[in-house]
Image (spheres, rainbow, N blue to C red):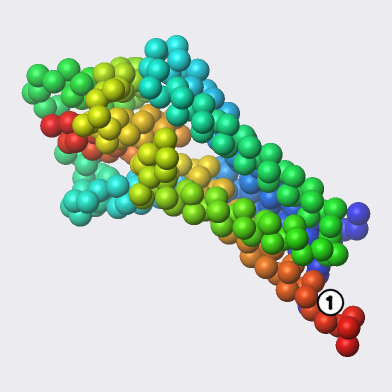
Amino acid sequence: MNNRTIQSIMFGIATISLLLVSNSVGTSAQTNFTNAIGNSNVSNSTLNSTSVTNSTSTNSDNPIVQSIDAAIKAIKDGDKDSGKKLLLKAEEALEGKSDLVDAEKRIEASLAALKDGDDNGAISQADEAKRNIS
Amino acid sequence: MINHKITVYSLAVILASVGIVYGLVAYSEYEDFKELSDMGIKGETSEKQIETSFFSATGIINFVLSAWVLKSGLRKMTPYIVSIIASIALIAIYISSRTVGVPIVGVEYYIGRLDIVSKVLQVVAIALSCISIYSLRNSKIIRIT
């Protein structure tokens, strides 16, 4: 193998490594693009900070909504494990409900975002799930 | 002047990288499957099994394509054409899954870091494959004339 070949391979590996460790690309794309594609309501596709700031607990009798609210609070408090458990509990409760498939998908997206380290994305997806249920 | 060897090796590396990324995604889906199984959420487990299988198969296909490209070099066009078709198909499936939905899985709302990495790599793979096909056609024309 000559030097040029080795250089091209090393360059390829370096590029891939940079992409894989880059947080900003994944975070901004997930939060902004997902909201733009997934929402028919244009106002919901604005900054995630808006949905995070405005995300407050609602007095709801719905146990699923209560679970999601508790999950959002836990994530904001930095307790991701509790947040994840509460989201899984909400997903379990939504299972089999054909009219709430969208909410279930949002909960899944929230769990995926949480796994990826995107707390804001997780909260915004959980908020969307709540709106779909309410 | 395009260095043909660099193009071929770079494409092989990119395809192998796509294979690795899909392998990581498949493993992540498998972890989710185990978690959901433990919790007794049965409705999601079949979806996760399908996703795990699909991503694993896609990863293997990309590794095979990488090896094929390396073996063929700039003698045959077929591996490059197949790489282009496979990459376009995977990008199309991904876009469908985030817009209109795909069978069994439905619509997914999440766009993760690995998703973006794999799509960028696939676009690069398509570009490099096109360059390789162009180089191959030009070298055939030069040989004929």
**Residue shown at 78% from the left, 75% from the top:** B137
| Residue B4 placement, left or right of B48 | right
Q: Quadrant of residue A27?
A: top left
Q: Quadrant of residue B84?
A: bottom right
**Residue shown at 51% from the left, 31% from the top:** B50
Number of residues whose C-alpha sits closer than 10 Å to that of mark 1, classed few (under 14), some (14–19) or many (20 or more): few
Q: Quadrant of the N terminus of chain B?
A: bottom right
Q: Quadrant of the C terminus of chain B?
A: bottom right
Mark 1 belongs to which subunit?
B
**Residue shown at 21% from the left, 45% from the top:** A50
**Residue shown at 17% from the left, 17% from the top:** A63
Residue most extreme to the front:
B103
Looking at the picture, how far across and down is residue A102, in whole percent? Answer: 27, 36
Q: Is residue B90 above or below residue B140?
A: above
Kindly state the secondary structure of the residue where label 1 is placed.
helix
Looking at the picture, how far across and down is residue B136, in whole percent? Answer: 79, 71
Looking at the picture, how far across and down is residue B53, in whole percent? Answer: 58, 31
Which residue lies under the disc numbered 1?
B139
For the residue pair A75 and B25, the one nearer the viewer reads as B25
Q: Is residue B25 above or below residue A88?
A: below
| Residue B6 placement, left or right of B116 | right
Q: Is residue B6 above or below residue B25?
A: below
Q: Is residue A6 visible?
A: no
